[in-house]
Amino acid sequence: MRFCPCRSKKISLFVFFFSKIIYLCTRFQNESLAQLVEQQTLNLWVLGSTPRRFTKDNSSQIFVTAVFLCPLMPSRITCFSYLLYLSLQSFFSPSLTSCRNHVLIMAKNTNAAVLLIHCPDRQGILAAVTDFININKGNILYLDQWVDKEDGLFFMRVEWSLDDFKIPREKIKEYFDTLIAQRFEMKFFLHFKDEKPRMAIFVSKMQHCLDDILSRYSSGEWNVEIPVIISNHPDLQYIAESHNIPFKLFPLRKDNKTMLEPLEIELLDSLNIDVIVLARYMQVLSEDFINHYPNKIINIHHSTLPAFVGAKPYHQAHDRGVKLIGATCHYVTADLDAGPIIEQDVVHITHKDTIDDLVRKGRDIEKIVFSRGVAKHLDHKVLAFRNRTVVFD
């Protein structure tokens, strides 16, 4: 950090050190509160919800943010001083202001493993899984479990740190299967938090869901790689190019689907794609294509399934005079619009709304629901079983 003769920068430098002193003092008085405030403050700062530099024009905004975050005065002081510290640090270190994506992605790329488990319910499952982690020096970061009492099934998601874990990551699956899974007849899925899922996007002509996905991707909100965007029309190629993502055109129709779909699969396999999202892709995938990616194809349907399946659901809803319309994010199966549901939401409408109003309101809820569902899949929070899902918090 270099000192500047400019008076305003000297004042800023003084405020920088002063705010850091206040922050450190308040943090010393209540460390647990400070940790919570730090996380909330840093999340908003990284996501761009607070000013990146402290000036006389945005000082009030920083203060309002502190008041909004923290209802109690001690935490307001901590938050305000921490925001000042971050903002002024960025003022003196320009490189810090350009690392928004890097900070957020690094925060998500922790050295941790995630297990998704389902099996017949019986005594001792939870103890066996946690003992496997604890005995091998793993620190559990998250654990959630649910029992389907009607069917007698146990579902669980557990995430733990690998920093001091004794078992090498390449051996965890083998050890867990031998020591735990076989004993309890478990089906399990192991993921590592520092491995970025590779996602392919399928689109047609409507761009609202694509725009929302790419916005979250570009901002660093999602820890994901997008190596390709595939479409049956050339209309949205310019969007892919603006994000430096390869765009591949496969002009599918009913008469050439059997010829072009194998080429799509070949491309996806060559790119090691983990998940496919259909961002208003207006083609029905063949059963062979779907079976190639079980529970790895995510679709957004513009209604609250199982109501109004198929084409033009808003027209159907308008004809029925419904008071709610919505959207459904679901895994794709061979049965049209009948796959396991990941996320749903609705928006109120009235008799005054025209079909155009329904379409406009519907598109807003579609992109929100779609992004929620995709995010939960990317965070390994969805466990599909039969034609249902267990979605962990």
Image (cartoon, rainbow, N blue to C red):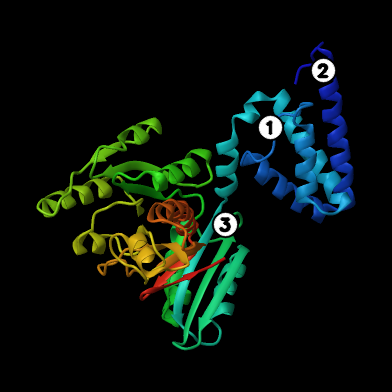
Camera sees residue 47: yes
Q: What amino acid is labelled 3 in the image?
A: Leu
Quadrant containing the N terminus in the rendered view = top right
Q: What amino acid is labelled 2 in the image?
A: Ser
Q: CA distance from mark 3 to mark 1?
A: 33 Å
- Where 334 falls versus 236 (above or below)? below
Q: Residue at label 1?
A: 52
Residue found at x 36% / y 76% = 386
Q: How many marks?
A: 3
> What number is the disc on residue 162?
3
Query: What percent of the width, then of the height, locates residue 28?
Result: 88, 48
Left or right: 236, with 176 as reference point: left
Residue found at x 56% / y 63% = 159
> What number is the disc on residue 8?
2
Whether label 3 touches label 2, CB < 8 Å: no
- Where 155 falls versus 237 (above or below)? below
Q: What amino acid is labelled 1 in the image?
A: Arg
